[in-house]
Image (tube, grey):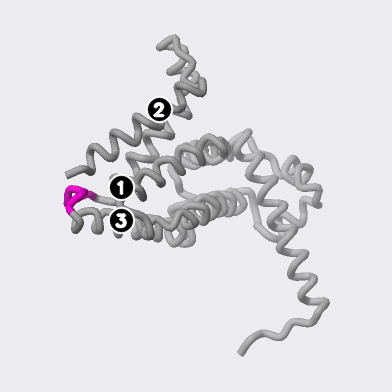
Amino acid sequence: MARETSPGGEERLRDADRSQNTILAAARDEFAEYGLGGARMDRIAERAGLNKRLIYYYFEDKEKLFQAVLEQAYRDIREQEAQLHLLDLEPATAVRRLIEFTWDYYLAHPEFMTLLNSANLHKARHLAESKRARELNSPLIETLAGVLERGRREGSFRGGVDPVQLYVSIAGMAYFYLSNNYTLSAIFGRDLMAPKARSERLSHMTEVILGYLSR
């Protein structure tokens, strides 16, 4: 039976959702800037413009808040990936689109990478404890597996490709380049974030991945 909610109750639910979303956005910025260890609940409350007690009411403590931020970060990228409708595209086009999306998303959302850096410093225990994080990421792997299988059946892709390994390669090629661009630019004496260099990197990633998949 559907739960009946009074107009006043509906408004309170909307207020609660707005408050939680505001807290998550503020916490995302705080964790991205200072990491889990350096983040402070006082600053998160100040960023959100809300009472600190409200943060504890919704999220209990900093550890649970960090987990919620990570879950939201994955929800955001996976929802945008779903809009690519990869299964509606030709296999090679679908893989190319995923590579381009991943590259562009990392460029547009550097906080995503810094959040992952912080999570890895703590051995991803917050994600390991999150059933929701696994549920959010499974559809992408299932979709990629479908794209690979279709390419195999049509004869354009080789068989035996693990979709998890393939996605790790796509993400890793983008992530390492961007997260280490300062050191790489310094040691090689090239501005790897110049527009031409970024374009060359995306082309290189696409050629490497599609070259590996091609039969």
| Residue 65, image x, y percentages | 62, 52
Checking the image for residue 92, the label placed there is 1
Checking the image for residue 147, the label placed there is 3
Residue 40 located left or right of residue 169: right
- Disc 1 marks a residue whose amino acid type is Ala
- Disc 3 marks a residue whose amino acid type is Val
CB-based contact (under 8 Å), mark 3 and mark 2:
no
201 vs 139, nearest the viewer? 201
Give the residue number, with chain letter if any, for mark 2: 201
Disc 2 secondary structure class: helix
Q: Is residue 129 visible?
A: no
Residue closest to the far bottom: 1
Q: Which residues are magenta?
A: 155-161
Name the dominant secondary structure of the magenta segment.
loop
| Residue 193, image x, y percentages | 50, 22
Say which label, 3 or 2, has the lower sequence index: 3
Location of residue 10 (image quadrant): bottom right
Name the residue rendered at 75%, 67% in the picture.
Answer: 14
Say which label, 3 or 1, has the lower sequence index: 1
- In reply to whether residue 159 is colored magenta, the answer given is yes
Name the residue rendered at 37%, 33% in the picture.
Answer: 173
Residue 27 located left or right of residue 11: left
Q: CA distance from mark 3 to mark 2?
A: 24 Å
